[in-house]
Amino acid sequence: MLNKRIGIDLGTANTVVYVAGKGIVLNEPTVVAVTAEENKVVAVGREAKEMLGRTPGNIVALRPLRDGVIADYTITEAMLSYFIDKAAGRSRIFKPEVMICIPSGVTQVERRAVLDATMAAGAKVAYLIEEPLAAAIGARVPIAQAAGHMVVDIGGGSTECAVISLGGVVVHNSVRVGGNKIDEAIANHTKKKFNLLIGERTAEEIKITIGNALLDEKAKGEEKKMEIRGRDSVTGLPRTIEMTEIAVNEAIAPVLNDIIGGVKGVLEQTPPELASDIIDKGIVMAGGTSLLNNFDKLMTKATGVPCHVAEDSLLCVVRGTGVALENIELYKRSIARK
């Protein structure tokens, strides 16, 4: 096939690119470094993430997506162009067909912004697929059946909850809370409790290393600890403290409750027949933030419905996008195009 088909999971934290016939070819942070004066792109992806919080005055490293939607159109377009070039090759004769994932709760204006940015970045045709649907396909949920399946996709910027039946979304809810809000909560807690200022990357490291959604009695006796370096907000000098699992749990609890509130909101609106299917099959959790230690146990405890994390949850959405891209006729009811 001469023209390539590319699936892009355009996430707030990471962008994953899938090429039909090849599989996943790219997985890079959604970060762009630009010059302050001309707004010219200097670095994209991993290279730009290394610059977060470390740039000189003339360079700014930023995230062009906020809460799952485009916050800076021009920079998103430049970033998409970079990813498409990297996946399809710069010297291409034919423009590729590109499918992009979007949160299910986005407005028409936000949808249009994604389609326009994709076309401007060099796509021949742009398709849009809703994230929960793509996550369900990627998690190998049989969505075409006349039965209810619930998927919760917890990403960096937003949490997408949806009940899917007969290949379409029946009930959905989008909460603009995700992994980035958890990082923010950790940074704020460290500042309030220890007078220590830490950066975005350190907060993320704390979440991954000692973050725990549900502390059991055994953990309380022998909790994990981690050494953290930052700047003292009183003296302004560098300082090191020891952070415990309990302190992190205390910091992130309100954010996790917001996410669980979004899931409960969907369960409350679900038709009774589908609700009984969901109790049988459980809730599938996808997205990078679902990997937070014991998050599935906390969700089960809060909702009363068994929850389990999908295999390779970080890549579920892009895998589903790839499957939909390779079988467009099957999924054409669920896809918007330009």
Image (spheres, helix red, strand yellow):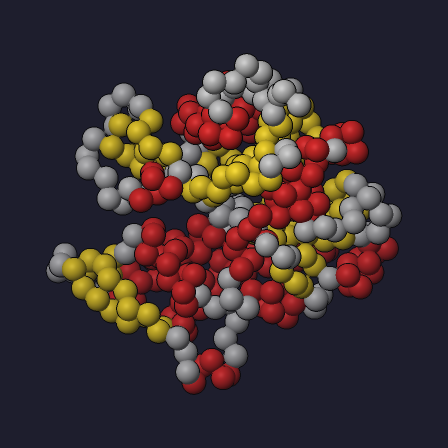
**Residue drawn at point x = 66 percent, y = 63 percent:** 308
Point out the residue furthest to the top here: 93
Drawn side of residue 205 relative to residue 306, left or right: left
The answer to whether 200 is drawn above or below residue 330 in the figure is below
Residue name at image x 50 percent, y 83 percent: 217
* Residue nearest the observer in this picture, 190 or 239: 239
Q: Position of residue 176 (x, y in %)?
A: 53, 45
Residue in the foreground of this view, choosing between 135 and 175? 135
Q: Nearer the viewer, residue 313 or 228?
A: 313
Picture quadrant of residue 331: top right
Q: Quadrant of residue 17?
A: top right
Q: Is residue 81 visible?
A: yes
Q: Is residue 270 left or right of residue 316?
A: right
Whole-percent x and y of residue 274?
82, 54
Would residue 267 appear left or right of 181 to someone viewing this image?
right
Residue at the image point whose x is 62% and y is 28% from the top: 5
In the rendering, at what x and y percent does residue 183 appear? 40, 55
Q: Position of residue 146 (x, y in %)?
A: 87, 48
Q: Could you tell me which quadrant the N terminus lies in?
A: top right
User: 26 above or below 187?
Assistant: above
Is the residue 16 above or below the residue 127 in the image?
below
